[in-house]
Image (tube, rainbow, N blue to C red):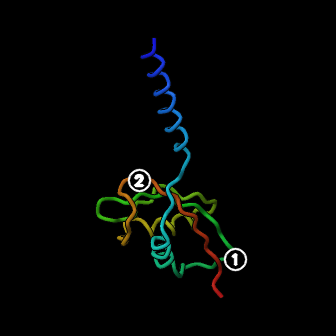
C-alpha cells in the first residue's frame, strides 16, 4: 500500500511539473531581435499606420530562420515578412527545432 501511495505522489508531481511549463513560450534574445530589425528594414511599400504582428518561427540546423506563421490581417504584410525572414541565416544561440514567437512592429519611417 505504501508503494502505491509513493507512486501516486510521484505521478502527481510529474504531471504538475509538465502542466506548469506547457503554456510558456520561449523568449528570443535581443541579438535575434536586432537581426530581425535589420532584415525587415525598408519595406518597398507605404505604411500608413503602425502594424503589429506576431511571427512564429524555428531555427533549423543551418541557423536559418524558418517562418511557420505570421499573425496579421494584411496579406501584403504577411508576404513581406515571410519573404524577408524565411531561410535567412542569423547568428544566434537559439535552440534548433524549438518554436519561437516574436512580436514585430512595423511603423512608418520619418
Which label is found at residue 75?
Answer: none
Query: Which is more foreground, mark 2 or mark 1?
Result: 2
Quickly name the residue at label 2.
98
Distance between mark 2 and mark 1 Cα atoms: 34 Å
Horizontal and vertical percent position of residue 67: 45, 60
Horizontal and vertical percent position of residue 26: 49, 56
At label 2, counting other C-alpha atoms closer than 10 Å, the crowd grade (few under 14, some 14-19, many 20 or more) is few
Q: Residue at x 44, y 22 (%)?
A: 7
Q: Most extreme residue toward the left, as rendered?
A: 62
Q: Residue at x 54, y 59 (%)?
A: 70
- SS category of the residue bearing label 2: loop
Screen quadrant of the C terminus: bottom right
Q: Residue at x 50, y 38 (%)?
A: 17
Horizontal and vertical percent position of residue 12: 51, 28
Quickly name the residue at label 1.
48
Q: Most extreme residue toward the bottom, as rendered?
A: 110
Between disc 2 and disc 1, whose residue precedes? 1
Compared to residue 108, the image places residue 13 above or below, namely: above
- SS category of the residue bearing label 1: loop
Horizontal and vertical percent position of residue 65: 40, 64
Q: Residue at x 40, y 62 (%)?
A: 94
Compared to residue 61, the image places residue 85 above or below, namely: below
At label 1, counting other C-alpha atoms closer than 10 Å, the crowd grade (few under 14, some 14-19, many 20 or more) is few
Amino acid at each position: 500500500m505504501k508503494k502505491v501511495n509513493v507512486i501516486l505522489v510521484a505521478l502527481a508531481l510529474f504531471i504538475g511539473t509538465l502542466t506548469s511549463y506547457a503554456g510558456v513560450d520561449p523568449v528570443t534574445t535581443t541579438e535575434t531581435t536586432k537581426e530581425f530589425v535589420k532584415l525587415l528594414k525598408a519595406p518597398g511599400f507605404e505604411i500608413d499606420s503602425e502594424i503589429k504582428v506576431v511571427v512564429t518561427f524555428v531555427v533549423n540546423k543551418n541557423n536559418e530562420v524558418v517562418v511557420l506563421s505570421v499573425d496579421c490581417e494584411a496579406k501584403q504584410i504577411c508576404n513581406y515578412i515571410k519573404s524577408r525572414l524565411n531561410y535567412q541565416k542569423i547568428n544566434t544561440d537559439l535552440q534548433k527545432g524549438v518554436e519561437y514567437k516574436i512580436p514585430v512592429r512595423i511603423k512608418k519611417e520619418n
